[in-house]
Amino acid sequence: MIVWVNGAFGSGKTTLVEELRPRWPEALVFDPEMVGYVLQEIVDVPTGDFQDLPLWRRQVASLAAGLAEEYRRPLLVPMTLVNPGYLDEVFGALGNAGLVVHHFFLKVPPEVLVRRIEGRVSFPDDPAREERVRAWCKARIEVCTGAVDTLPGDTVFLDGTSPVRELADQVLAHVG
């Protein structure tokens, strides 16, 4: 089983997965961004978004399926994935591998997302890089929040402004 936690940058995906992890100790955490970072070291990403690489999408689905098959444990996946074609491609490959995907989307108002993005620090020793990352995340808020209407019909929408413990309770209740 895969629990995919989706939402805009700053919506709380990683925070929710960090809350779920100790409460679901058998689950593995798989962050598809790591696949993207590796690919960015090897090949040029003309658009600046590694999700635009077909290889990224194939590798994410393949690695997730491989982890689930090899270790027979559920996967927690915190990843923004809102392009309908890309989402269908990745989730379709996971379904073809026989995996059940529980898809959660954290809905957060844009002004809260901006505040959260401004408040986090990923590169304290590199202010220029920090600002580039913040600008990139903020530039994608509209696309991410606008994707709500294009997500799969079985997506479970969560109020990303709720306390993280409550969100984790909701996810665990849903997946059983």
Image: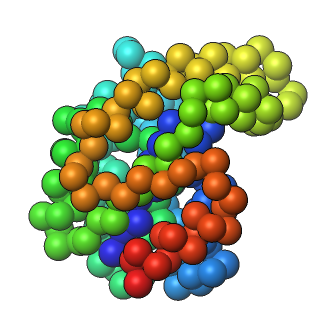
Splitting the image into 4 quarters, where does residue 45 fall? top left
Splitting the image into 4 quarters, where does residue 11 fall? top right
Up the image or down, 28 lies above or below 110; here it is below
Q: Which residue is rendered at x = 31% and y = 55% of the image?
A: 155
Q: Which residue is rendered at x = 66% and y = 32% of the image?
A: 112
Q: Nearer the viewer, residue 90 or 50?
A: 90
Location of the N terminus by quadrant is bottom left
Q: Is residue 89 left or right of residue 45?
A: left
Q: Nearer the viewer, residue 130 or 161?
A: 161
Image coordinates for residue 16, horizontal then vertical, percent: 61, 60
Splitting the image into 4 quarters, where does residue 138 fall? top right
Location of the C terminus by quadrant is bottom left
Q: Which residue is rendered at x = 50% and y = 32% of the image?
A: 41
Asked whether residue 117 is in view, the answer is no
Image coordinates for residue 62, horizontal then vertical, percent: 27, 58
Total tally of numbered discs in the picture: 0
Q: Is residue 123 left or right of residue 139?
A: right
Q: Which residue is rendered at x = 87% and y = 28% of the image?
A: 125
Up the image or down, 35 lies above or below 171; here it is above
